[in-house]
Image: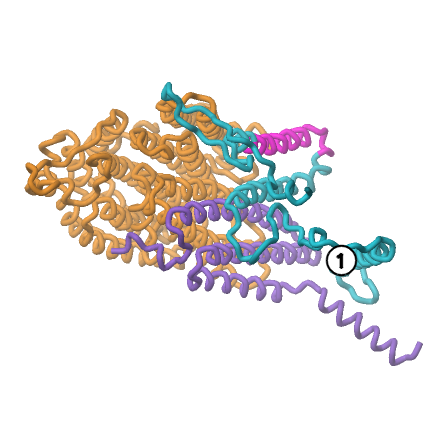
């Protein structure tokens, strides 16, 4: 369909650009508004950069705790594997046309896929990889290794300190 | 699409379910019961094999004929065997059955050869056996895959599991092997994917047997499709470990735990050859043999020469077996040379010979790696040639089996390796590629030098003292009934396959 | 409105339209460049993390090629009425996203495990077995 005399389908992206533009404008508008309205009493604590979980003290080039990577890797996997769900979602409407059995099968497959992902979540949870201090197996007197859960600390240990 | 066709992939489902069971079992059982984990993994492989055989029998009964060797050889008449299922994504044919069988065998045998590694906690965990089963499931799917999408996904299931397996021992060599395997494997996968992208762009198709059939869908030039196929071949030759893309093999095979090395040398190689076979027989076929077969022939000659030549210089038995594996990739490539005027019967014969080679090679290689994994002293793994001195006195049975595997790998009668080599050389000559076959025979004769060095070390070489001042002692082995079962079973099979080479084909009828 | 200004505005719209028009060749050129940069990175970089990033770059180049080709097939099907072959390319691209994520996660995990053992991420140090 010709848009502004230009016959190109990519002009359909104008909606996206419109959305982008209004998002930027809205952000600026809200920030300016709050700047005009709020009281301004800075303290060093308030001026501190918010860096999730780490105290912004000293150089930024310190070595990050390796546990960040474990949680991040797990997150990336669960986040991105859902890309495989999109194809079913896009054709789902056409599947409902022929009586609905195909749609039911596709629905079941979808849940099977998510179920397998959920099993993975259960596994890492049980293994203790989601806790900040990883639980590990220790030998006991009977020679049987058992799960020992060290003291659990929240995901962001320094946040408590910062609030006080 | 008929959803009940999914049941024909039930063997893969069985193996995947076993993988989940093993992984979760490790979470709930007590540590002293962990010896059960390899048994569960083994049971998964056996059940998978049973399900595969049951599938084969029910298909044969249903269609009143055995499946065709590959989908291109299927008759098109109504009521004839149609191997393509799920919209052509998988082809349930004899080639797929054979590759899946070899994969299950390799998986079961590598579970057996890993079961003694109790000293290393990572190697006795449920994750280790679960990953072996996942890799086996990927190999089986790769055997049946008939579409670039399913091919790529199965390849990645197999590869990613094997990357982790290669690094599962907690030492530097194992970690280094995993890193190298990961980087180079991902690198080659990228080339493979780019090739698929080009082919898809030129033809709009993803089915392996259809992409080269001329149609009006072609967007553009022959350059795109040729470039795509070239990139794809680079990726596939990388995966099978053919020269000039073989350089990653020795380091990865040496560094990985021995049970995993066995799996990589046999199962992963068989699955990679499944891709190569489908490309050679279904995509190119006799129609395009003029354009592409010379490339396979050149790669075969180069691979045989490089593998055998470099194996001569190795002092480490595991590394020597890695180079020997490269040489065997060369021999196997000879089995995939298609003649421009071949008919369906000849192609089926060639595939049958190649599959026989894969089976024989899997048995003798896994057996040899099993022996290498057992030779150790004070918990230290010994892999050098001189460490095998005196093995014939300390463990005559193991030494005899190792000698048999070496003779079989060298291609001496009456062992399975002889018939395997004979059959692939014969199919190369029949297809009209005489010079590569002659070079294959010559390099095969030269290869006896390094295989016999192992036999000489075990039977002739004088034993040395491990520490100065001690009495000389021969090679010592760890005892493990599972690995012994693997070694003696593989040894027996190597002889039986050599004496009755038509056995597997007889069973198919 | 001034006639010259109208002309300039329509030129701008024309220029924007040309910029936004789908061109297979430009997409493939970008994809090829990304792939080449990634391949060079894998072969030349010394930091193993940069090598992994380069591999991801190559996979993203493949994804871009697939999406571009899928689009070209959609256009071709519209122009000629041939059977539609666009969706398999898009599904392939989505699949590659998932595969690349799995590969990256496993790769980083292996690098972390190796770093704990060796305290190095330099590829020149990863050569214990060279003979």
Q: Is residue B200 in view?
A: yes
Q: Magenta region, mostly helix, strand or loop? A: helix
Chain in cyan, by letter, is A
Chain C in the picture: what colour?
purple
Q: Nearer the viewer, residue A35 or B71?
A: A35
Residue C46 x, y percent position in the rendering: 42, 61
Residue in the picture at 25% in, 48% down: B319
Q: Nearer the viewer, residue A58 or B36?
A: A58
* Tag 1 secondary structure: helix
Image quadrant holding the C terminus of chain B, namely top left
Dot 1 alpha-carbon crowd within 10 angstroms: few under 14, some 14 to 19, many 20 or more: few
In the image, taking residue A146 as reference, residue A55 lies left or right, namely right
In the image, taking residue B128 as reference, residue B409 lies left or right, namely left
Residue B33 x, y percent position in the rendering: 38, 21
Residue in the picture at 81% in, 55% down: A40
In the image, taking residue C13 as reference, residue C65 lies left or right, namely left
Which quadrant would residue B501 be assigned to in this image?
Answer: top left
Residue A111: in magenta span:
yes
Rendered position, A65 above or below B394? below
Q: Magenta span covers which residues?
A: A96-121
Residue in the picture at 56% in, 50% down: B205
Q: What chain does badge 1 belong to?
A: A
Q: Nearer the viewer, residue B400 or C46?
A: C46
**Residue occupied by mark 1:** A13
Chain B in the picture: what colour?
orange
Rendered position, C28 above or below B396? below
Residue C87 x, y percent position in the rendering: 64, 48
Rendered position, B224 above or below B67? below
Residue lying farthest to the right in this orientation: C1
Which quadrant would residue A120 be assigned to in this image?
Answer: top right
In the image, taking residue B249 as reference, residue B182 lies left or right, namely right
Residue B175: in magenta span:
no
């Amino acid at each position: 369909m010709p848009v502004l005399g230009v016959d190109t389908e990519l002009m359909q992206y104008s909606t996206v650009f419109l959305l982008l533009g209004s998002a930027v404008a809205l952000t600026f508008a809200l920030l300016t508004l709050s700047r005009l309205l709020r009281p301004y009493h800075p303290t060093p604590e308030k001026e501190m950069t918010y860096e999730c979980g780490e105290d912004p003290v000293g150089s930024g080039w310190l070595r990050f705790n390796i546990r960040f990577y474990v949680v991040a890797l797990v997150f990336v996997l669960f986040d991105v594997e859902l890309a495989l769900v999109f194809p079913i979602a896009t054709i789902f409407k056409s599947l409902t046309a022929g009586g609905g059995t195909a749609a039911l099968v596709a629905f079941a497959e979808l849940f099977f896929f998510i179920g397998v992902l959920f099993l993975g979540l259960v596994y890492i949870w049980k293994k203790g990889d989601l806790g900040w201090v990883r639980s590990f197996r220790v030998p006991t007197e009977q020679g049987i290794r058992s799960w020992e859960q060290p003291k659990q600390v929240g995901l962001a240990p320094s946040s408590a300190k910062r609030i006080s | 699409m008929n959803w009940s066709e999914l049941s024909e992939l039930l063997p893969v489902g069985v193996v995947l379910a076993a993988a989940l069971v093993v992984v979760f079992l490790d979470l709930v059982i007590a540590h002293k019961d962990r010896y059960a984990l390899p048994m569960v993994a083994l049971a998964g492989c056996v059940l998978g094999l049973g399900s595969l055989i049951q599938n084969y029998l029910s298909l044969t009964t249903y269609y009143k004929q055995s499946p065709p060797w590959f989908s291109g050889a299927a008759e098109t008449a109504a009521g004839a065997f149609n191997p393509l299922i799920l919209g052509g994504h998988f082809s349930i044919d004899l080639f797929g059955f054979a590759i899946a069988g070899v994969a299950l065998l390799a998986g079961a045998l590598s579970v057996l050869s890993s079961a003694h590694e109790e000293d290393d906690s990572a190697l006795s965990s449920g994750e280790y056996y679960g990953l072996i089963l996942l890799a086996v499931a990927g190999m089986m799917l790769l055997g049946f895959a008939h579409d670039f999408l399913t091919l790529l996904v199965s390849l990645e299931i197999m590869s990613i599991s094997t990357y982790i397996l290669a690094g599962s021992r907690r030492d530097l060599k194992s970690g280094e092997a995993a890193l190298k395997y990961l980087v180079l494997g991902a690198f080659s996968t990228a080339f493979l994917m780019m090739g698929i992208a080009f082919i898809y762009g030129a033809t709009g198709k993803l089915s392996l047997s259809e992409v080269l059939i001329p149609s009006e869908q072609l967007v553009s030039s022959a350059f795109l499709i040729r470039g795509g196929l070239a990139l794809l071949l680079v990726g596939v030759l990388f995966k099978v470990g053919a020269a000039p893309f073989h350089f990653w093999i020795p380091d990865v095979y040496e560094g990985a735990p021995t049970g995993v090395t066995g799996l990589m040398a046999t199962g992963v190689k068989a699955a990679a050859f499944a891709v190569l076979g489908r490309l050679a027989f279904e995509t190119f076929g006799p129609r395009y043999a003029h354009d592409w077969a010379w490339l396979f022939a050149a790669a075969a000659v180069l691979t045989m020469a490089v593998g055998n030549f470099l194996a001569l210089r190795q002092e480490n038995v595991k590394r020597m077996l890695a180079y020997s594996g490269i040489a065997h990739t060369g021999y196997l490539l000879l089995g995939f040379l298609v003649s421009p005027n071949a008919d369906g019967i000849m192609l089926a014969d060639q595939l049958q010979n190649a599959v026989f080679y894969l089976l024989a090679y899997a048995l003798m290689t896994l057996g040899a790696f099993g022996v290498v994994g057992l030779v150790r002293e004070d918990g230290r793994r010994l892999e050098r040639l001189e460490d095998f001195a005196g093995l014939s006195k300390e463990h005559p049975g193991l030494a005899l089996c190792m000698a048999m595997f070496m003779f079989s790998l060298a291609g001496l009668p009456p062992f399975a390796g002889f018939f395997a080599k004979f059959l692939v050389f014969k199919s190369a000559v029949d297809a009209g590629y005489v010079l590569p076959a002659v070079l294959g025979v010559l390099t095969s004769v030269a290869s006896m030098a390094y295989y016999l060095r192992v036999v000489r070390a075990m039977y002739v070489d004088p034993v040395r003292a491990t520490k100065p001042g001690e009495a000389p002692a021969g090679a010592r082995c760890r005892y493990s009934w599972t690995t012994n079962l693997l070694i003696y079973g593989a040894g027996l099979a190597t002889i039986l396959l050599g004496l009755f080479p038509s056995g597997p084909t007889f069973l198919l009828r | 409105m001034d006639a010259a200004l109208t002309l300039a505005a329509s030129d701008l719209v024309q220029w924007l339209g040309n910029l936004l028009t789908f061109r297979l060749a430009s997409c493939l050129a970008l994809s090829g460049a990304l792939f080449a940069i990634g391949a060079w990175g894998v072969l030349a970089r010394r930091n193993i993390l940069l090598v992994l990033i380069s591999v991801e770059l190559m996979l993203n180049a493949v994804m871009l090629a697939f999406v571009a080709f899928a689009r070209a097939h959609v256009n071709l099907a519209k122009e000629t009425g041939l059977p539609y072959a666009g969706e398999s390319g898009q599904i392939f691209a989505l699949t590659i996203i998932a595969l690349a994520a799995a590969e990256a996660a496993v790769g980083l995990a292996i690098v972390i495990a190796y770093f704990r053992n060796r305290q190095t991420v330099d590829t020149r140090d990863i050569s214990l077995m060279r003979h």
